[in-house]
Amino acid sequence: MKTKILKIYEKNIDKEKIKFAADVLRKGGLVVFPTETVYGLGANSFDSRAVKKIFKVKNRPSDNPLIVHIANKRDIYKLSKEVSKEAVKLMDKCWPGPLTIILKKSEIVPYETCGGRETIAIRMPSNKIALELIKSAKIPIAAPSANLSGKPSPTSKEHVIEDLYGKVEVIIDGGETEIGLESTIVDFTVAPPVLLRPGKISLENLRNVLGKIRIHPYVRGFVKRECIKNFETDVIAPGMKYKHYSPNAYLILVEGKKENIRKKIKEIVKKYKSKNKKVGLIITEDYYGKELTKFVCADFNLIAKNLFKIFREFDKKGTDIIIVEGVKEKNIGLAIMNRLRKAASEIIKV
Ligand code: TXA
Ligand code: MG
């Protein structure tokens, strides 16, 4: 398939290009578009044939449901007949923005979009290109992250091209995404609501608005991957049971007390270097010389923004081992640790 790449600037949106992409969506095609979190692989959420293409192109298991993107808050009442007051409260505070809410789905939403479930994930993004596209298409857009299943989510056109070029009709290039990690997901089909995936909208933010909120154990990585196949029915976000965000390199996450982490990292680096392995580091302070490939950053928002990009860059350099320093689970730190634990081949606690 020939893929058309459309460069669109968020500050000066070319309506003709948006209309072209919206027409592709209306006709059942696939369009990759930027959001403030990561790029999304979009299709008409009401068209089960179009939605099935998303699963095929990404190689995504069909029971892993998609997020439906809207451009007008009132659209939730079409997609769900059971919208709780709590959900409205949070939605009013955070939309448009990096928040996804889970509600009971209405009958107009095909089961394919929801991975066969009775519930639906809905989000109103704040990226202006995404909003214009949804408005122009006049339909809610189902869109998972625009990566191949298991790969890190794409935060730039280059990443999307790596994974999906030739497999979709249109890629909208809207530059680098602002946040870099996927939206926060809160399930409102249960009371009190449950945080399923942490993101830029933090647990602290959620507590401020909702008061009571439960945290799914998987958010902090307390559920071991080996156990997952045994608790199929307990898993509320189906995406939780699949390996995610992984670079090709073997990723070692070292978490615990800062001083201990550093000592341990030095030890591991030495071990792998003596085996002639190519080592890459993601650390908050530079305690290494020039010879190592590394990303040094102490700003949590910048770590979030760059994490998936660094994974891909390290892979391109042929890095064998990526060693990552764990961060504090406050604010967006919880989302960073959630993604790191899911990406890790090995977690060392010190
Ligand atoms: O920031 C984002 O959320 C990005 C952009 C493109 O909007 N999208 C995204 O989609 O990250 P995806 O498909 O990569 O992740 C969606 C997650 C999956 O873990 C899925 O299992 C969960 O949302 N999900 C979707 N529908 C659900 C439902 N009805 N109940 C529970 N979890 C659901
Ligand atoms: Mg994804």
Image: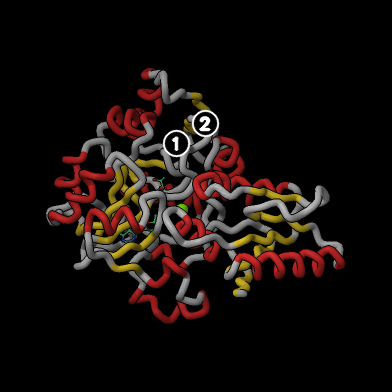
Is residue 304 or residue 49 the one in the foreground? Answer: 304
Callout 1, which amino acid?
Pro
**Mark 1, secondary structure of its residue:** loop
Residue 160 vs residue 139: left or right?
right
Mark 2, Cα crowd under 10 Å, few <14 / some 14-19 / many 20+, is: some
Q: Identify the residue at the far front of this view.
A: 259
The image shows residue 325 at horizontal and vertical percentages of 62, 61
Quadrant where ligand 1 appears: bottom left
The image shows residue 274 at horizontal and vertical percentages of 87, 67
Mark 2 — residue?
175
Callout 2, which amino acid?
Gly
Residue 220 vs residue 109: left or right?
right
Q: Quadrant of the N terminus?
A: top right
The quadrant holding residue 160 is top right
Mark 1 — residue?
34
The image shows residue 10 at horizontal and vertical percentages of 42, 25
